Image (cartoon, rainbow, N blue to C red):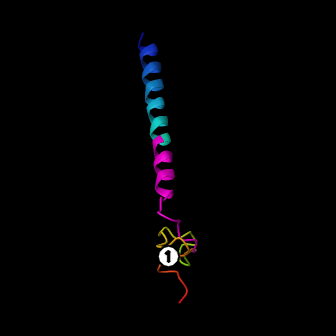
Amino acid sequence: MKKIFFIVLIALTTMSFLSIEDNQTILIQSIETIECKYRQCNAIARSTEKRCKHCVSDSSDYQCYQHKPN
């Protein structure tokens, strides 16, 4: 009886950890997706080598105010 109890306890514990990992993956994906009125800036940051997360201010723009060439 004790063996069955421990097996069920371990199975439930393992399943609860799997759902936490799935939630973290969904959270990371939602953070990376940015909703802008027109579009996201297409510039790449020199420091991180990742795409800028700012939004452009006009429909004809492709880069945000920080990355726009003068």
| Stretch in magenta | 23-43
SS at badge 1: loop
Residue designated by label 1: 64
- At 49% from the left and 72% from the top, the residue drawn is 56
Q: Does the magenta stretch include residue 57?
A: no
Going by the numbered disc 1, the residue's amino acid type is Cys
Whether residue 64 is situated above or below residue 26 in the rendered picture: below
Extreme front residue here?
59
> x%, y% of residue 46?
56, 78
Q: How many marks?
A: 1
> x%, y% of residue 19?
47, 36
> x%, y% of residue 50?
56, 69
Name the foreground residue: 64 vs 20.
64
Q: Quadrant of residue 60?
A: bottom right
Extreme top residue here?
1
> x%, y% of residue 21?
48, 42
- At 48% from the left and 30% from the top, the residue drawn is 15
Name the foreground residue: 42 vs 31.
42
Whether residue 41 is situated above or below residue 5 in the rendered picture: below
- At 49% from the left and 67% from the top, the residue drawn is 53
In what quadrant of the picture does the N terminus appear?
top left
Query: Is the residue marked by circle 1 packed among few (<14), some (14-19), or many (20+) residues within 10 Å?
Result: many
Q: Is residue 42 magenta?
A: yes
- At 51% from the left and 46% from the top, the residue drawn is 25
